[in-house]
Image (spheres, coloured by chain):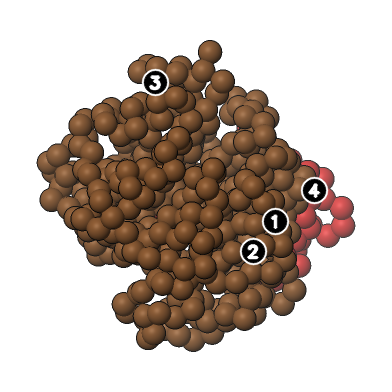
Chain colours: A brown, B red
Amino acid sequence: MSGVRVLVGTRKGAFVLTSDGKREQWEVSGPHFAGWEIYHVKGSPADPNRLYASQSSGWFGQLIQRSSDAGKTWEPVGNQFVYDGVPGTHQWYDGTPHPWEFARVWHLEPSLTDPDTVYAGVQDAALFRSTDAGQSWHELPGLRGHGSGPHWQPGAGGLCLHTIVLDPTDPKRMFVAISAAGAFRTDDSGGTWRPINRGLKSQGIPDPNAEVGHCVHRIAMHPSRPGVLFMQKHWDVMRSDDAGDTWHEVSGNLPTDFGFAIDVHAHEPETIYVVPIKSDSEHFPPDGRLRVYRSRAGGGEWEALTNGLPQRDCYVNVLRDAMAVDTLDSCGIYFGTTGGQVYGSPDAGDSWRPIVRDLPPVLSVEVQTLR
Amino acid sequence: MIRVELPAHLRTLARVDGVVELDVEGPATLRAVLDALDARYPVLRGTIRDHVTLQRRPFLRFFACQEDFSHEPPDTPLPDAVITGTKPLLVVGAMAGG
């Protein structure tokens, strides 16, 4: 019996939504960790019962929770994130040097092959790895130690490493994205990194074509084509066909190319999804209409998907980690909003239904396909 | 026996109901009590004080006997009423939310 498990992180706890393969009836469990900010919950591809959650609070700091029974029970594991060596400084909003300070874990990315190995993207931007199921964490300092590190500046949400993409065909290669430094790639398991931002153009920084300084919001990859990357940047939807060495814009006919989330159809590597947001100062859909846009051509040409989504008076946002796909034969798409709705489409975006309507603001959505 | 009253979220995390009772070896200072708390409940490490600097987290305060000990040096002795267990040491989260 196939099914799906949707892992939802919100401002006030985590929720687990489960359904069978039809994806019509849903069970909702939660809130787990009620009252805490859950930036991200993600399951191990190597063991679907192993989940990791980032739990944080302005009062009590960071915790990492681990489940080995698919979210029925949880146990807190290691929460000590210490930068390697002398932390040094990055640039503050006003351009002055500012010491690297750990604030929270934005994103947890479990290894594709080992349930006990998991990566953490943190604020202030750095990449950590645990090889003991979250008990202890060690920085991969080559990223922050890249020569550009002292020049990185925070985006509005802080200097955060929010995206980690693992290459399923090359265990030594991974991609990360940092707001507002840009995208980086390693080809030696995280030992060394290089910026991969050629082709990005960001107005508002001194050199619009700079090597670093771009506010990358999210990167997505189809596992069958790890050299092809899609990016939702602060403004602009971008595509790379050479593992990030160069990028070109594929915003095409989108009503606005600002946004946060981007994802790829599970079975069609050229079918991609974004949720256009009006602007960086108006974080809601244009015209009060919540529309997912789908391109079946890998970008450039986009169609609005509206069936079942509110088409008036809708002023929610969809954050960068709040969209995911399942891998059932008819690919399911899911996204959560800052208004507390989680929408699901069992037919690749043709039609949508709210799975839940009234959660706290949704920070992240991940999907596990159960077979 | 020293009694420590934790905020609700930390009681949930430590899986305790009500006041925590601790035996503290040596002089009963704020540092010694918090060290004993961390030792008894490792899950609380990092939630009250920073892991490395052991600085109080900014939105928490330490109160006892109607006095604020938050800004006292960590080796300041606690009041006798706390040391004897008559009064608890309060770990208090800042009120927020409007």
Q: Are marks 2 and 4 in contact (CB under 8 Å)?
A: no
Query: Residue type at mark 1?
Result: Lys
Q: Residues within 10 Å of mark 3 (few under 14, many from 20)?
A: some
- The residue indicated by pointer 1 is A172
What separation in Å lies between label 4 and label 3 (alpha carbons)? 46 Å
The kind of residue tagged 4 is Ala
* Quarter-of-image position of residue A256: bottom left
| 2 vs 4, front mark | 2
Q: What mark, if any, has residue B39 been given in the picture? A: 4
Q: Chain of mark 3?
A: A
| Distance in Å between CA atoms under marks 2 and 3 | 38 Å
Q: Determine which of the numbered discs, if any, sits on residue A283 in the image.
A: none
Give the crowd class for mark 4: few <14, some 14-19, many >=20 residues within 10 Å: few
Tell me the residue that label 3 is attached to.
A23
| Residue in the foreground of this view, choosing between B62 and A191 | A191
Q: What is the CA distance from the residue labelled 2 to the residue labelled 1? A: 7 Å
A82 w.r.t. B12: above or below: below
One can see residue A10 in this view? no
Amino acid type, callout 3: Arg
Q: Nearer the viewer, residue A367 or A236?
A: A236
Residue B25 location (% of width, % of height): 87, 53
Residue at mark 2: A186
Amino acid carrying mark 2 in the image: Thr
Tell me the CA gap for discs 2 and 4: 39 Å
Taking B6 as reference, is A267 left or right? Answer: left
Assign a secondary structure to mark 1.
Answer: loop
Residue A257 found in image quarter = bottom left
Discs 3, 1 touching: Cβ within 8 Å: no
**Disc 2 vs disc 1: Cβ atoms closer than 8 Å?**
yes
